Amino acid sequence: MVEPFYTVCRVLHVGGGWLAFASGAVALGAAKGSRAHILAGRCFALSMAIGVTAGILLSIFRTDPQSTLLFQGIVALVFLATGYLAPRIGRQSRGSYRWDRALTAVGFLASLSLLRQGLLHATLQAPVQFGVVMGGFGLWVTGRHAWWRGPAQPSRWRVEHLTSFLAAYTVSWSFIIGLYVEALPAAARVLIPAAGGVAGIWWARRRFGEPALGPDPAAGALTAADAPSR
């Protein structure tokens, strides 16, 4: 890899990641829907997207390309994108919903590839592999998100928004803990962020509700209000 290119990607990867972790914490702590929450959330999405994209480039353009890191980056970007699109889908944007469906399929395939990579490296001595845990986590989140009917269930946007952003936060933290917290056993470095992510998503779905997967009453109200008068 050319040295200036590597240096720029490295700075963007590290700087974007740490800014995303800080702004993500602010967004989680702020009152939902407040100006602080919105600004911190936008900062989180943008800085995380920059950091993850730079990380993907680093995983590709190196002497020994890392497919596991590549799939991890794709999964994180997909969760960022679906989290960003959720409020727009809640406002009946069918174009955003089509993008959401395509991205969800990409996230599912990337998670499946991540799981496959983990299974290839798993042994009896080291059964807990990063790819197995994070690939399974990604399949769980994308699988649940795939059931959302978008504009037909507009009131569910907040749950999907938080779930996707928390999932992106989890995948990114798993990379940091796995790489830098060497004092912990390898299995713990994978399981701790995964357990935190599952707990956070469970809290979000319990706190903000998870409407039934049938027709959303809010969708009917919007349709009736927008219908031309006879």
Image: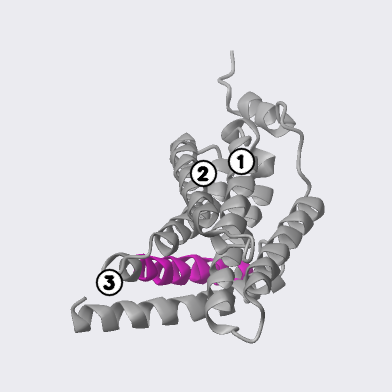
Rendered-image quadrant of the N terminus: bottom left
Colouring scheme applied when the structure was drawn: one colour
Q: Which badge, 3 or 1, comes first in the chain's sequence?
A: 3
Whether pointer 2 and pointer 1 mark residues with C-beta atoms closer than 8 Å, the reply is yes
Q: Which badge, 2 or 1, comes first in the chain's sequence?
A: 2
How many angstroms separate mark 3 from mark 1 (CA)?
32 Å
User: Looking at the rendering, which quadrant does residue 228 occupy?
Assistant: top right
Q: Nearer the viewer, mark 3 or mark 2?
A: 3
Give amino acid for label 3. Answer: Arg
Q: Residue furthest left?
A: 2
Rendered-image quadrant of the C terminus: top right
How many angstroms separate mark 2 from mark 1 (CA)?
7 Å
User: Looking at the rendering, which quadrant does residue 226 occupy?
Assistant: top right
Dot 3 alpha-carbon crowd within 10 angstroms: few under 14, some 14 to 19, many 20 or more: few
Q: Which of 218 and 40 lies nearest the eye of the viewer? A: 40
Q: Secondary structure at mark 2?
A: helix
The magenta stretch spans which residues? Answer: 36-56
Q: Is residue 206 magenta?
A: no
Give amino acid for label 2. Answer: Phe
Q: Which mark is residue 62?
A: 3
Magenta stretch mostly in which secondary structure?
helix
- Identify which residue is drawn at 58% across, 34% down: 151
The residue at which mark 2 appears reads as 108
Dot 2 alpha-carbon crowd within 10 angstroms: few under 14, some 14 to 19, many 20 or more: many
Q: Position of residue 110 (x, y in %)?
A: 46, 49
How many angstroms separate mark 3 from mark 2 (CA)?
26 Å
The residue at which mark 1 appears reads as 143
Whether pointer 3 and pointer 1 mark residues with C-beta atoms closer than 8 Å, the reply is no
Q: Residue furthest top?
A: 230
Residue 70 relative to residue 222: left or right: left
